[in-house]
């Protein structure tokens, strides 16, 4: 059995723990500006991918289109997001951050920056060069088995 091997079990625990602690720290920081973790995730995706559709945003966030729509509704209500009908298909909305949304993204990044710097400044470049390819493969392979389960 795979998880009888202590190293694989520890790997899963560490990856899960890293995610949980990143989320806890980030939520605590961005709460100050009345932002949620999913909202920050959307802002992060949209700052790098302008003019995507709600369906494309859902794919970027690895969520479903209903969740993406609810998230867009909350961002639009706060004035952080503007939806524009697609020129070719008026049923499709294109998403773009407003100036206020870009400002909120910057503010959130500033709030979480200090804590992340305290942690990541201890990581040496050679450590990153070794661990990033491994984590990238792990992420890709886990995403593949998730895709397989949905399809069959």
Image (spheres, rainbow, N blue to C red):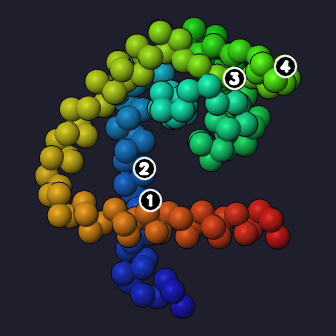
Q: Are marks 2 and 1 in contact (CB under 8 Å)?
A: yes
Q: Earlier in the sequence, mark 3 or mark 2?
A: 2
How far apart, in angstroms, are the residues tagged by discs 2 and 1? Answer: 6 Å
Quickly name the residue at label 3: 94
Compared with residue 108, is residue 103 higher up or lower down, i.e. above or below?
A: above
> From mark 3 to mark 2, how far is it between C-alphas?
32 Å
Q: Using the image as rendered, state which of residue 136 and residue 108 is in the foreground.
A: 136
Find disc 4 in the rendering and name its residue: 90
Residue contact at pointers 4 and 2, CB within 8 angstroms = no
Q: Residue at x 26, y 68 (%)?
A: 130
Q: Earlier along the polypeptide chain: callout 1 or callout 4?
A: 1
Task: Name the residue beneath numbered marker 2.
Answer: 20
Q: Is residue 125 visible?
A: yes
Q: Nearer the viewer, mark 4 or mark 2?
A: 4
Mark 3 neighbour density, 10 Å: few (under 14) some (14–19) many (20 or more): many
* Secondary structure of residue under mark 2: helix
Q: Is residue 138 left or right of residue 124?
A: right
Rendered position, 53 above or below 96: below
Label 2 CA crowd tier, 10 Å (few <14, some 14–19, many 20+): few
């Amino acid at each position: 059995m795979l998880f009888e091997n202590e190293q694989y079990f520890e790997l899963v625990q560490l990856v899960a723990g890293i995610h949980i602690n990143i989320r806890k720290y980030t939520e605590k920081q961005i709460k100050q500006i009345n932002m949620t973790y999913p909202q920050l995730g959307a802002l992060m995706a949209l700052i790098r991918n302008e003019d995507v559709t709600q369906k494309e945003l859902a794919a970027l966030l690895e969520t479903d289109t209903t969740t993406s729509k609810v998230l867009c509704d909350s961002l639009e209500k706060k004035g952080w997001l503007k939806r524009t009908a697609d020129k070719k298909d008026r049923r499709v909305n294109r998403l773009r951050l407003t100036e206020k949304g870009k400002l909120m993204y910057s503010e959130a990044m500033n709030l979480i920056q200090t804590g992340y710097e305290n942690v990541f400044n201890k990581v040496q470049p050679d450590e990153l060069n070794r661990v990033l390819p491994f984590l990238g493969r792990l992420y890709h392979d886990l995403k593949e088995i998730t895709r397989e389960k949905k399809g069959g």
